[in-house]
Amino acid sequence: MATETAPRERADVGTYEDICAAAARTTGLTAFGGTEHEEGLRLLVEDLASPEAGLTPVGNYFHRSQVKSALVGRLMTQARLAEFPQHQDVRIERPIFVTGLVRTGTTALHRLLAADPAHQGLETWLTEFPQPRPPRETWEQDPVFNAIQGAYRQHHVANPEFMGIHYMDATSVEECWRVLRQSGKSISFESLAHVPRYSAWLAKQDWRDAYEVHRRTLQLIGLNDADKRWVLKNPSHLVALDALMEVYPDALVVVTHRDPVVSVASGCSLSAEATAGMSTTFVGKTIGATQLEMLSRSWRSFREARGRYDQAQFFDVDYRSFVKDPVGTVESIYAHFDIPWSDAARAEVARIDAESRSGKARPKHDYLLGDYGLDSDQVRAAFE
């Protein structure tokens, strides 16, 4: 029988230099491949160490680990890029990017699109430790894979409510933020803590360098599957559309839509559940205010940038229509972008859809907007 593991604690987050040294000790590597990541991560660490973040000992450990993971990922990526120089020859053609506000069906749609045997996505463990994707049948013999899978099993035991909100494990195709954060840029950081200076800095940044790292990482991970189309997903693609389209000019962008009142309430609940016990300030009304500002800013940025590109490269999905007919929605996306809809694709998409409706991956989520000091009029005004 599984037992709950006590959360780990630290007296403080530490300094940026201290966390860099810890990442170097963990990997045995020191080459970060440039310094463009330093400004954002330094500012983030300073914010996390401030009274405004209000981190508890558990929060200190968690957020330090997040920064360290970004640095470990960068070190590992640089080493593997040097080890496999042939990654530079891998072409990434017409990748699909799923984006939208949080809790608008992006995760479910992403997983259905990635189910096609002709497609590939970013598996969670490979976003943590980038490398050319090994054959699936070998993963259980990989100590890194087993360590990450074991950590998720413990997390699900200790946090059963979070599993119902967003189920994931080491094999799941997941969001791009673990790759983007290697450049110090990720809205995930401001979704998990009160970091106002970092948030203000991030809102003014050009994300081009982050997406260049993103592209090289896809070339590396997909080295053994170069014939497969990439399917990616992240809410932060909203705020960085110009950078995305500059690095991936033939990108196919799928945009999910849902009532923002529901989306913001659900997103706040996700942030609260993911950070329970980690901060004395990132709770209740602070979560509501920060997440509403960040989400509405992201949406306005996307809306403004979208008009600069060929609208044939975009496809809009209504959440209600998607829930009513997931497989039909996927087929419509294929038709719009002229992607072959094979019998194998139809079968796998239908299978994954059926699995998602039952068992451990079945979504279950309760939330109230008022718990975060917000009402529907505030949310609608922010998105008007």
Image (cartoon, rainbow, N blue to C red):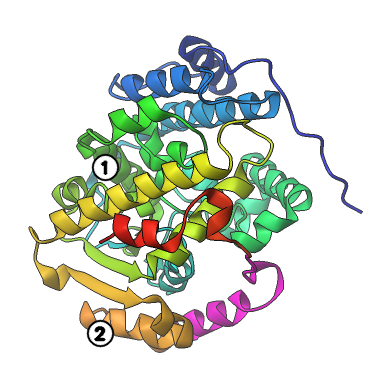
* Residue 347 is a magenta residue: yes
Q: Quadrant of the C terminus?
A: bottom left
- Residue 56 percent across, percent down from the top left: 66, 25
- Categorize mark 1 by other alpha carbons within 10 Å: few (<14), some (14-19), many (20+): many
Residue 281 seen in this snapshot? yes
Up-down relation of residue 122 to residue 276 (above or below): below
Q: Relative to the observer, which residue lies in front, 204 or 146?
A: 204
- Is 342 in front, or is 87? 342
**Callout 1 secondary element:** helix
Residue position marked by numbered label 2 in the rendering: 335
Image point (67%, 58%), residue name: 163
Residue type highlighted by circle 2: Ala
Position above or below: 62 against 162: above
Marks 1/2: CA–CA distance: 27 Å
Question: Is residue 28 on the magenta stretch?
Answer: no
Q: Which residue is mark 1?
A: 211
- Residue at position x 88%, y 46% in the image: 3
Q: List x then y, in percent, for residue 260.
A: 39, 64
